[in-house]
Amino acid sequence: LTIFLLPFFLSVAISETHSNDKNSYTLPIEIGARLGIGLNRAADEIAPETLSKIMQGVENGDKDNIYFYGILKLYGISLSQDVSIAATSFLRAATLGHKEATTAYGLSLLYGYGVEKDTIAAERWFRTGIALGDMDSYWLLGKMLLDGEGNNRTPNATLEAATLFMTAAEMGHIPQAEYHLALMYEYGHGGLDKNFPLAITYYKRAAEQNHLQSMYNLALMYAYGRGCEQNYNLARPLLEAAAQRNHAPSIYYIGIFKTYGYGYNVNYEQAVNWFEKAAGLDDATVSEKAKKAGMELKRLLLKAYKTNEQIINNYQSLSENH
C-alpha cells in the first residue's frame, strides 16, 4: 500500500517575530496579588468581622485598610464593585505614603481606570512609588518610557527604561521587568548590546515565575537556537504550559511543531485541531494565520485521503487483473 505523504507546505514556517505583549486584561498587573486577593480570588468573600475591621480602619484613616478597601471595590469582593471608588481609595492611601497604593493609583491614571486618563500624572505617581521603594513602579515607568508615554521623550528615555527594568529585575525579581529586560537584550534596545544568552537568562527567570509571554519567548529562543543550541524538546514543554493557559501564539506554534515534526511526531490531524483552537481565541497576533493554516492543512489532508483512495483502487484493480 502506497502512502501519500503531505509535502512541507504552509506559508507559516516559524517566524522570529514575537507576539505583542499586550493582553486582554485592562491592567497589566493584578493589584492586590501580594495580599492573596485579586482577579483569581474575586469570588472569595471576606469574613464579616474582618470586613468590619477594614471599614473601621478606613474611617480612622489607616492607609493599609484604605488600600485594602480600594482592592475590594476594584474587584467587587464582599462589596459592590466600583472602580471609581477604588481609584479614590488608592489616591487617599497614596497621599498617606502607602507605596503599593501609590503604584496602583499611577496605574489607574495610566489606563484611565476609575479616573480620567492622565499619563503625565501617572508618571509622577510612579516616580513617587519608586522613591517609596515599590518595585512595580520601576518597571511600569520603564514600560511607559519604552512606549513613549512619559515626559522623557529624548533618546535617553529607553536607556532610563533599561535601568529601571534592571533595578526591578535584580532587586525585586519582578517577572515583568525581567521580561522587558530580556526583550531589550534580545533585540539590542535601550543602549544594551544584543545578547542572546542574557536574554535567555532573564526570560527563564520570568518563566519560572509563570510569566506567560516569557515562557513563549523562551520557547522560541530554544526553537531558533538563539543564544543556545536549537532544541525543540526544550521549547515544547514551555509552549504546552502556556497553551494550558490559552495563550494563542503558543497554541499556534504547537500546531506548527506537529505539522513539521518539531519536538513531536508528525500528526496532521492534531495540528489542525491546534490551529483551530488558536484561531478561536481571537488573538490579533495569530488568529487569522492560524485559521488559514488550519484550512490549508485540512484541504491538503482531504487531497491526501482522496489520493490514497485512488492508489488503493488502482492497486486492487491491478491485483484483480493478475
Image (cartoon, rainbow, N blue to C red):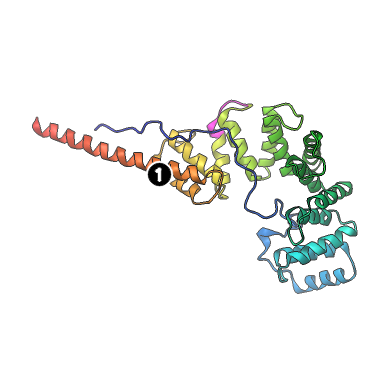
Tell me the quadrant of the picture where the N terminus can be found. Answer: top left
Residue type at mark 1: give it.
Met
Secondary structure, mark 1, is helix
Give yes or no for residue 232 being in the magenta stretch. Answer: yes
Residue 271, image quadrant: top left
Give yes or no for residue 299 being in the magenta stretch. Answer: no
Magenta-colored span: 228-234
Tell me the quadrant of the picture where the C terminus can be found. Answer: top left
Whole-percent x and y of residue 193?
73, 26
Q: Is residue 46 left or right of residue 319?
A: right
Vertical side of 272 occupied by 14: above or below: above
Find disc 1 in the rendering and name its residue. Answer: 295
Q: Is residue 14 left or right of residue 138?
A: left
Vertical side of 310 occupied by 130: above or below: below
Q: Is residue 303 left or right of residue 105?
A: left
Depth order, front residue of 25/148: 148
Vertical side of 199 occupied by 209: above or below: below
Residue 30, image quadrant: bottom right
Whole-percent x and y of residue 67?
82, 62
Whole-percent x and y of residue 22?
65, 47
